[in-house]
Amino acid sequence: MPLFEESQFASGATKNFHLGLAALLVVGIVVAVLFVVVGGGSDGSRPGRALLLPLAVVLCGTIAPMLILRLRIRVDDSHLRVQLWPAPPTTEIPREQIRSVYRTTVRPLRDFGGWGIKFKKGHRLYSWGGTNGVTIEYFHKGKDRKVTVTTERCDELVAALGA
């Protein structure tokens, strides 16, 4: 049974960004469909039609996955697990390797260059929105490391990792 579990979609500034992407995707698809159904050249030809399928694939292939991403955080008796789902890498930290846990304020764009899974030397960020986070310092393979996870439930996560 998990001591803490959260699955968060975009929030804050990234939520507005994702709403903009969704609007762009919808507008792009509507324009492409209208062009195929109604549009074309004045002579009846459809010169832009060859570009529409690749454009639709690129739009759907890059924007749509960003709209379904979510950050999963789970703490159980043995591990902390963090994943930006459905991306495959999951960070698993055995609880016995954790040295300290504390609340922090993070500015993903300024501090790490953006949202998502970001890396600095010895420090990893999992952020899908917001500025409140929890930093976990741990020892792994002979090195001190840090993971910061953004969450609006900081106190609950700190308590779960301290239990």
Image (cartoon, helix red, strand yellow):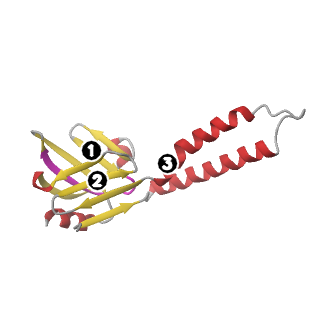
- Tag 3–tag 1 contact (CB < 8 Å): no
Residue lying at 61% horizontally and 53% vertically, measured from the top left: 23
Q: Earlier in the sequence, mark 3 or mark 1?
A: 3
Q: Earlier in the sequence, mark 3 or mark 2?
A: 3
Magenta-drawn stretch contains 125: no
The residue that mark 2 highlights is 82
Give coordinates of residue 45: x percent, y percent: 84, 32
Find the residue positioned furthest to the front.
1
Numbered tag placed on residue 65 in the rendering: 3
The Cα atoms of the two marked residues, 1 and 2, are separated by 11 Å
Residue 7 in sight in this render: yes
Residue lying at 24% horizontally and 66% vertically, measured from the top left: 2
The Cα atoms of the two marked residues, 3 and 2, are separated by 19 Å
When the figure is inspected, residue 121 is found, relative to residue 71, above or below; the finding is above
Q: What kind of element bears circle 3?
A: helix
- Which region is colored magenta? 128-139
The amino acid marked with disc number 1 is Arg
Give coordinates of residue 130: x percent, y percent: 38, 57
**Residue 72 found in image quarter:** bottom left
Give coordinates of residue 37: x percent, y percent: 79, 45
Q: Residues within 10 Å of mark 1 (few under 14, many from 20)?
A: some
The amino acid marked with disc number 2 is Val
Numbered tag placed on residue 124 in the rendering: 1
Numbered tag placed on residue 144 in the rendering: none
Q: Label the magenta part by its dominant secondary structure.
A: strand
Q: Is residue 12 left or right of residue 149?
A: right
Is the C terminus in the top left, top right, bottom left or bottom right quadrant? Answer: bottom left
Q: Nearer the viewer, mark 1 or mark 2?
A: 2
The Cα atoms of the two marked residues, 3 and 1, are separated by 22 Å
